[in-house]
Image (cartoon, helix red, strand yellow):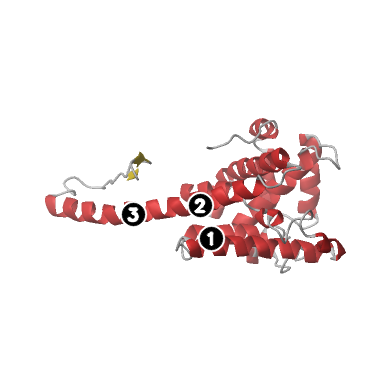
């Protein structure tokens, strides 16, 4: 398959019986494959546009630009580790996991817009934490929806996945999260995975206001949150079961795609 002259992959058809691909069937598959390739290219354009938006917004965070880009990258990589480990349990296919990885990097994109930035919106200082968080989440959704309309991709399945991650990654299983206080099965699996990935990176990353935690200490803290009914235990166990891979991500940094 090619997208504007760029090779992007192979489309492979298989059959469970000999002689299935006769001339008539082959002609139909060729016709259908043209439509399928077109849909794949449209989805790819949508995903890339969303990722580019997130990268551009993070680059406006002049004070902590590298920290922000590194955090986004690592949350995406932790999301991959968790997603692949719980794929069978939660019936996640390869495409969904790949989109989750890319969109996990956009989980807090609203923070870097005008309304979500402390540097540009000092009046938010007067709000409570819950209201500030809700405002940032809504602004993230506004940005994504505006871009989806601009590129005429509002109905893409991947856009809905991105909306779920942005809107619900601060929800807790016991209903104490934000912005809607959802609980258990009402919180999409994608958001539950990104919640764990995000918290883990926040704990294990050095910030200007806090020291980084060790892998062991961070996992114990996550398990405490599982015991309290806050986060998905299967997602935490996925990290615990892959500690060598987790350590590599902990030491990694964002690499520019362009």
Residue pointed to by mark 3 = 38
Q: Position of residue 167 (x, y in %)?
A: 65, 62
Q: Of 6 and 161, which appears nearest the observer? A: 6
Q: Is residue 178 visible?
A: no
- For residue 247, what is the image quadrant? top right
Q: Position of residue 15 (x, y in %)?
A: 26, 47
Residue pointed to by mark 2 = 49
Residue depth check, mark 3 versus mark 1: number of the one nearer the observer = 1
Give the residue drawn at x 61%, y 44%.
Answer: 76
Cα distance, mark 2 to mark 3? 17 Å
Mark 2 and mark 1 residues within 8 Å of each other at the beta carbon? yes
Give the residue drawn at x 68%, y 44%.
Answer: 237
SS at mark 1 in the image? helix
Q: Of 84 and 9, which appears nearest the observer? A: 9
Q: Earlier in the sequence, mark 2 or mark 3?
A: 3
Give the residue drawn at x 60%, y 34%.
Answer: 255
Q: Quadrant of the N terminus?
A: top left
Q: Is residue 94 visible?
A: yes
Residue 156 located left or right of residue 181: left
- Height in image: 140 above or below 194? below
SS at mark 3 in the image? helix
Local crowd at mark 3 within 10 Å, few (<14), some, or many (≥20)?
Answer: some
- Which mark is on residue 147? 1
Q: Earlier in the sequence, mark 2 or mark 1?
A: 2
- Height in image: 171 above or below 213? below
Mark 2 and mark 3 residues within 8 Å of each other at the beta carbon? no
Q: Earlier in the sequence, mark 3 or mark 1?
A: 3
């Amino acid at each position: 398959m090619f997208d504007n002259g760029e090779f992007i992959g192979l489309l492979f058809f298989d059959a469970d019986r000999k002689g299935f691909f006769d001339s008539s069937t082959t002609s139909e598959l060729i016709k259908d494959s043209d439509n399928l390739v077109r849909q794949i290219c449209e989805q790819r354009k949508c995903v890339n546009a969303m990722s580019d938006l997130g990268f551009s917004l993070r680059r406006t965070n002049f004070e902590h630009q590298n920290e922000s880009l590194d955090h986004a990258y690592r949350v995406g990589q932790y999301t991959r580790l968790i997603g692949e480990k719980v794929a069978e349990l939660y019936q996640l296919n390869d495409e969904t996991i790949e989109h989750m990885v890319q969109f996990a990097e956009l989980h807090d994109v609203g923070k870097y817009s005008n309304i979500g930035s402390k540097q540009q919106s000092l009046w938010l200082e007067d709000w409570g934490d819950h209201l500030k968080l809700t405002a940032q989440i809504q602004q993230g959704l506004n940005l994504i929806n505006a871009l989806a309309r601009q590129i005429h991709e509002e109905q893409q399945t991947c856009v809905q996945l991105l909306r779920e991650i942005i809107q619900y990654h601060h929800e807790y299983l016991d209903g104490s999260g934000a912005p809607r206080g959802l609980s258990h099965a009402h919180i999409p699996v994608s958001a539950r995975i990104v919640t764990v990935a995000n918290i883990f990176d926040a704990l294990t990353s050095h910030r200007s206001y806090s020291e980084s935690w060790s892998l062991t200490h961070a996992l114990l803290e996550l398990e405490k949150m599982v015991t309290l009914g806050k986060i998905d235990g299967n997602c935490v166990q996925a990290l615990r079961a892959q500690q060598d891979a987790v350590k590599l991500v902990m030491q990694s940094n964002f690499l520019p795609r362009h």
